[in-house]
Image (spheres, rainbow, N blue to C red):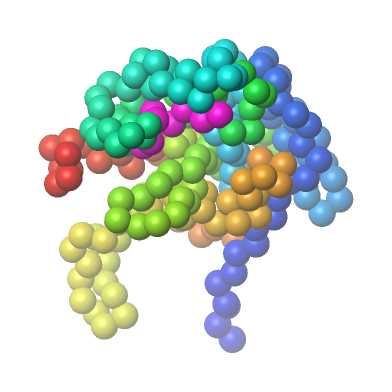
Amino acid sequence: MTDVPRLAVFGLVGMPEVSPGDDLAAAIALAAARPGSELADGDVVVVTQKIVSKAEGRLVAVDPDDPLSHKPLVEAESVRILRRRGELIISETSHGFVCANAGIDLSNVDRGFAALLPEDSDRSARRIRDALRHRFGVDVAVVVSDTFGRPWRRGVTDVAIGVAGLRPIADLRGTHDTYGRELQVTEVAVADEIASAAELVMGKASGVPVAVVRGIPSAWFGTGSVRDDVVRAPADDLFR
């Protein structure tokens, strides 16, 4: 009987409110200690950018009574402004991300503060992975996720902005499809797909900022970086 490919995705409930300086891995470890939530080798732990930014102190005070008070931060966190439309700014960050308002967010943070993106999300993922391996003795990958919009499509979805222990791109070039044709250009953004799957159990307002994705093929594990492997170089970008 042929094995049926399966994935399991579950949220880690019971995460405490995260504050600057908190040990994020310790909080994840506490939530993962609940019966039925234990981590296992080969799991991918998906952590939202918001709690990573909080733990790393990437919070900046803004005027709570001025809805535009965070706009100077957007300018400061951008290396290039691509588009402006009303209050919306589409910009490129120092990480190479092209996103709305340089990824700065006012949701799910205390009133009067804005959350900036982590300085290095790949490094953040590595720190969490190393700490979880030390605490549990299990080999997991870590994805730091954030919500991005997409050109030409309505709605937002979660994508990976940092990875550790995972190849974020599955390069299928040179392999063959089911009809025997050689694939010439196909590269699959597996880290983004994992982040998006995890968001389905985390939600935007459910208070579940960490999820576990189980059943990812072992071939996808290894070394990689969102900044180096996922962000498209400007010379290869047809739209900038």
User: Does 42 appear above or below 225?
Assistant: below
User: Does 114 appear above or below 34?
Assistant: above
Residue 134 pos. (x, y %): 69, 29
* Span shown in magenta: 99-106
Name the one closer to the observer, 77 or 119.
77
Total labels: the figure holds 0
Residue at horizontal 78%, vertical 50%? Answer: 37
Residue 183 pos. (x, y %): 22, 67
Name the one closer to the observer, 167 or 45.
45
Residue 135 pos. (x, y %): 74, 31
Residue 120 pos. (x, y %): 45, 24
Q: Is residue 14 magenta?
A: no
Left or right placement of residue 120 versus residue 20 in this view: left
Image quadrant in which the N terminus is located: bottom right
Quarter-of-image position of residue 208: top right
Left or right placement of residue 35 versus residue 77 in this view: right
Name the one closer to the observer, 81 or 229.
81
Q: Is residue 116 visible?
A: no
User: Does 237 appear above or below 153?
Assistant: above
Residue at horizontal 47%, vertical 27%? Answer: 104
Residue at horizontal 56%, vertical 15%? Answer: 63
Left or right placement of residue 7 versus residue 225 in this view: right
Left or right placement of residue 126 versus residue 232 in this view: right
Residue at horizontal 59%, vertical 69%? Answer: 6
Q: Is residue 156 visible?
A: yes
Please, which residue is most extreme toward the right here?
A: 35
Please, which residue is most extreme toward the bottom here?
A: 1
Quarter-of-image position of residue 209: top right
